[in-house]
Image (cartoon, rainbow, N blue to C red):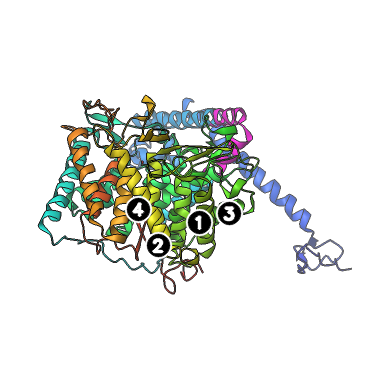
Amino acid sequence: MTTPALLPLSGRRIPPLNLGPPSFPHHRATLRLSEKFILLLILSAFITLCFGAFFFLPDSSKHKRFDLGLEDVLIPHVDAGKGAKNPGVFLIHGPDEHRHREEEERLRNKIRADHEKALEEAKEKLRKSREEIRAEIQTEKNKVVQEMKIKENKPLPPVPIPNLVGISGGDPEDSDIREKREKIKEMMKHAWDNYRTYGWGHNELRPIARKGHSPNIFGSSQMGATIVDALDTLYIMGLHAEFLDGQRWIEDNLDFSVNSEVSVFEVNIRFIGGLLAAYYLSGEEIFKIKAVQLAEKLLPAFNTPTGIPWAMVNLKSGVGRNWGWASAGSSILAEFGTLHMEFMHLSYLTGDLIYYKKVMHIRKLLQKMDRPNGLYPNYLNPRTGRWGQYHTSVGGLGDSFYEYLLKAWLMSDKTDHEARKMYDDAIEAIEKHLIKKSRGGLVFIGEWKNGHLEKKMGHLACFAGGMFALGADGSRTDKAGHYLELGAEIARTCHESYDRTALKLGPESFKFDGAVEAVAVRQAEKYYILRPEVIETYWYLWRFTHDPRYRQWGWEAALAIEKYCRVSGGFSGVKDVYSSTPTHDDVQQSFFLAETLKYLYLLFSGDDLLPLEHWVFNTEAHPLPVLHLANTTLSGNPAVR
Ligand code: DMJ
């Protein structure tokens, strides 16, 4: 009788396993699979037992052994390092027996310590919430993948490098303009050198206390934010020794495995944006690698029920949460809506679609939502997918979301029509509901709060002048002239907010209320923290119109910064722009080097430096190249295909 062949789940036939001698036909010569499994189980249990016995049987070395008088023969073979691999040689007496005991003791201690550690970790795990554990697992997985990539030294997939036009130059012909540009470069040197001396490796500098400083957006980390933020400005200014110095610090010290809770938005725009720009300008791989490493650390922030990321993430554990002050546990529009440019470049450079998917998911979700009056509220709850407070602003909390819709279109070589449509729709609603003209004829952008317009404009909203000008070309029904004009009006209003102060520097926010126009009213709104938005708008308007007033206004601002913000240890913000004797806040913000000084330098450079047909600046002024169709857009990128 023959045993029928077994039919495994896959359906493939397994021939019977014949173990018995052919001369005993009535003895079953075949084994079923389950029997084989049991045999294997017994075998593995036996091996485990032997292995365990080796470690846990009583310490045989302590027992008196027979002296075979072989020490002299065997001793030369005993070697502390190799001994562990060859336990046999530990049977020898003499001075090596002692060494052998020590080695065994060390091993035993190690096993004990490992057990205790595992026990502790298990206890620790039990104390954590499900979400925390899930995030930790995800982070661990990412870490392993990343480490494998690094270990294998696998270069990131090759992609065609976009057209890198105008990464240096821009020398002005006019000697006066050349001198002004040189002055801006000198200011950059002053800011950098002092940070180098007193704040190196810290996120920012306290120029008066002459020590490092870190804003809460970077938690307790010391990740050299100023270095990363400043790199591309150093590069375009031709400060190559300083650039190299920064590069070396990044190579040797920039580490993202820190137990620190950071702002996803800020880390994205300053670090990932800064590293990507430094990579494109210099071609140095290290910047790309660091940008990708950091991006992986941000990914757990997207583990929310809706895929709208948390505002903050712990770089080590991957646990995310939102700002305590944000309406009903919401994420912020300007934060989760300002990831697109950097994430598209990450997918482009790595061939990994994960970044692209994350930001497109956010876009799709927003498209499906109702918008009161066509306006996007600033708060969105990442658990429920519902809007929080109905508060809309083009300044803080909303600003760069609109900017990135426009720039997504520009960066795609004007092929991302969906982004352009979202931008056009949003801007139309903003113009209808938020943009007004004051009695004195100043055009301003107010804020929508619970059904009424607050006639207040923030310094941050002044960037919109540049955005309207940048988006003019390509706007609906030939409204290009209108938007350029609107951009110019905003530039004028923001210039007025500077001009109406004692220091000729603009306040954090200003009102339009009866006789009050473009002036801060509350004491808490009178500060200037070296922000770039007004100068950014001057620069865009300069590029599109070449009207000399923008250079003039930019120069006024540069002189005021030099006069009132410069101290011997760097540059500091001021607490009250209406007081002619300024009090300093003692912070040199990293965006002063990334943005304010860069826009000033570009304002006094020729248009051939970083031309706008080839470069799009992220919201922290880090230039990223346009991914031209055919050879370099995402869909045309062989790495992605
Ligand atoms: C910068 O970090 C960025 O420009 C951001 O979009 C808003 N604010 C600061 C500078 O003011």
Q: Look at label 1 and name its amino acid.
A: Tyr
On screen, residue 9 versus residue 365, left or right, reads right
* Residue closer to the observer: 293 or 275: 275
How far apart marks 3 and 2 lie (CA) works out to 34 Å
Can you tell which mark lies on residue 488?
4
> In this picture, is 199 found above or below 308?
above
> According to the image, label 1 marks what residue?
423
Per the rendered image, the range of residues in magenta is 118-140
Describe the element under mark 3 as helix, strand or loop. helix
Q: Position of residue 420 (x, y in %)?
A: 50, 61
Q: Nearer the viewer, mark 3 or mark 2?
A: 2
> According to the image, label 3 marks what residue?
361
Crowd around label 2: few <14 · some 14–19 · many ≥20 (10 Å): few
Crowd around label 1: few <14 · some 14–19 · many ≥20 (10 Å): many
* Residue closer to the observer: 609 or 283: 609
Marks 1 & 3, CB-CB < 8 Å contact: no
Query: Can residue 122 be found in the magenta stretch?
Result: yes
Q: Which of marks 4 and 1 is in front?
A: 4
Among numbered discs 3 and 4, the one appearing first in the sequence? 3
Please identify the quadrant where the N terminus is shown. bottom right
Among numbered discs 3 and 2, the one appearing first in the sequence? 3
Can you tell which mark lies on residue 481?
2
Marks 2 & 1, CB-CB < 8 Å contact: no
Q: Position of residue 186 (x, y in %)?
A: 15, 45
How far apart marks 4 and 1 lie (CA) works out to 19 Å
Q: Look at label 3 and name its amino acid.
A: His
Describe the element under mark 1 as helix, strand or loop. helix
Q: Is residue 296 visible?
A: yes
